[in-house]
Image (cartoon, rainbow, N blue to C red):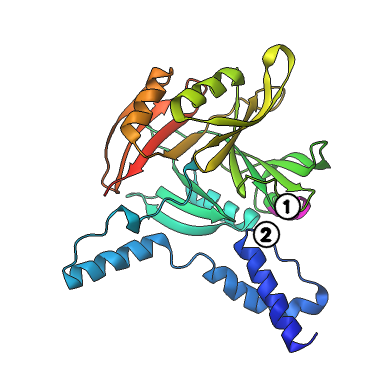
């Protein structure tokens, strides 16, 4: 391989990493591996926590006014929030199984994790250790990666329990299922097509498995302006699988059946007006968890329970 070909190949591998894909190297290209390891470490730098701290210190030195909400950008409107009994272990699992990059970790006084954020491809996930007020819960997520078989094997090596081995599905995915150390189900897939994942999905998509999914769809349309992108119905109007669009994000859901579900997930939803979204959700049948109020970490948010086992925290950034 010429030096120019090697540079172009390295550029292609880095581009694949930026898009959330796994760059596959041939035996003749193994000399690129050290450079790709460096690129992986640099992929999500600077971390958000460091950037915010640096901005605050520079503002303090120059006498500038504190940064407004634009200093903390919303990466995606809908973020799954995993609450588990051992968050540090789950962080290690996400790194080893799915190549997650840790963006932020806030330790809890006395041990554990109060809040953490990771990136998997182009998607964000938040997580924390459970408490008496916010106990651990087991949700479901759909992750698309370039090689479902390899990702499944890595997940098992990292401590996951198999739900089912990789299999070709009639809807065009090569798919496997695992349960992570925190009890969450992961559907690991590679789409057979022009891209490793279907159009409109991020690398990771939250998946709600509930009883009476059709009624949840109706609630989400009223409460959060969700639109149905795709829906497959079973007997008597049962929603077997659906994709909903909420702002810039996609949510998948389906009827609990057999070994699948129901699950319980926490979701962080960024909206233009948290008060209005919270009120619409309550009017649509959700139960209040916490009233909307300003938080010390730069958000105005409040929580509701949707009545199907999931909790939603609607939020807007403070200026």
Question: Vertical placement of 285 versus 271: above or below?
Answer: above
The residue that disc 2 covers is 21
Stretch of the chain drawn in magenta: 146-154
Residue 57 figure quarter: bottom left
The answer to whether residue 81 of the structure is visible from this angle is no
- Residue 83 lies in the magenta stretch: no
Estimate how packed mark 1 is, as few (under 14), some (14 to 19) or many (20 or more) residues with alpha carbons within 10 Å: many
Residue 289 figure quarter: top left
Q: Residue furthest left?
A: 63
In this rendering, position of residue 141 left or right of residue 52: right
Where is residue 197? Give x, y as percent: 70, 48
Question: Vertical placement of 140 versus 174: above or below?
Answer: above
At a point 72% along the width and 76% down the height, the residue shown is 9
Estimate how packed mark 2 is, as few (under 14), some (14 to 19) or many (20 or more) residues with alpha carbons within 10 Å: many
In this rendering, position of residue 62 left or right of residue 181: left
The answer to whether residue 277 of the structure is visible from this angle is yes
Q: How many labels sit on residues? A: 2
**Quadrant into which the N terminus falls:** bottom right
At a point 53% along the width and 55% down the height, the residue shown is 119
Q: Earlier in the sequence, mark 1 or mark 2?
A: 2
In this rendering, position of residue 184 left or right of residue 311: right
- Residue 151 lies in the magenta stretch: yes
Question: Vertical placement of 291 versus 106: above or below?
Answer: above
Q: Which circle marks residue 196 in the picture?
A: 1
Where is residue 45? Give x, y as percent: 47, 67
How far apart in space, not on screen, are marks 1 and 2 (Cα)? 8 Å
**Is disc 1 in contact with disc 2, using a CB cutoff of under 8 Å?**
yes
Closest to the observer: 247 or 93?
247
């Amino acid at each position: 391989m010429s030096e120019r070909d090697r540079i172009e190949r390295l550029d292609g591998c880095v581009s694949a990493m930026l898009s959330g894909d796994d760059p596959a190297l041939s035996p003749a290209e193994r000399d690129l591996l050290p450079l790709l390891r460096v690129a992986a470490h640099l992929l999500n730098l600077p971390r958000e926590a460091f950037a915010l701290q640096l901005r605050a210190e520079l503002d303090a030195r120059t006498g500038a006014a504190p940064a407004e909400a634009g200093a903390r950008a919303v990466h995606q409107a809908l973020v799954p929030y995993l609450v588990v009994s051992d968050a540090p272990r789950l962080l290690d699992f996400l790194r080893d199984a799915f190549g997650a990059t840790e963006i932020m970790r806030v330790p809890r006084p006395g041990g554990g994790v109060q809040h953490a954020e990771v990136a998997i491809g182009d998607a964000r996930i938040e997580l924390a250790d459970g408490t008496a007020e916010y106990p651990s819960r087991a949700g479901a997520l759909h992750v698309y990666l370039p090689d479902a078989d390899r990702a499944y094997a890595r997940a098992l090596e990292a401590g996951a329990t198999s739900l089912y081995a990789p299999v070709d599905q009639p809807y065009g995915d090569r798919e496997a299922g695992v349960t992570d150390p925190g009890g969450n189900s992961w559907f690991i897939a590679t789409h057979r097509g022009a891209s490793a994942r279907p159009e409109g999905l991020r690398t990771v998509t939250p998946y709600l498995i509930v009883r009476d999914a059709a009624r949840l769809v109706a609630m989400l349309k009223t409460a959060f302006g969700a639109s149905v992108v795709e829906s497959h119905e079973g007997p008597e109007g049962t929603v077997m699988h659906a994709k909903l669009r909420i702002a810039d994000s996609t949510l998948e859901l389906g009827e609990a059946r057999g070994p699948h579900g129901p699950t319980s997930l926490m979701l962080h939803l960024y909206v233009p007006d948290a008060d209005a979204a919270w009120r619409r959700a309550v009017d649509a049948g959700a139960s209040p968890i916490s009233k909307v109020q300003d938080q010390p970490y730069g958000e105005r948010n409040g929580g509701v329970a949707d009545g199907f086992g999931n909790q939603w925290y609607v939020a807007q950034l403070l200026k």
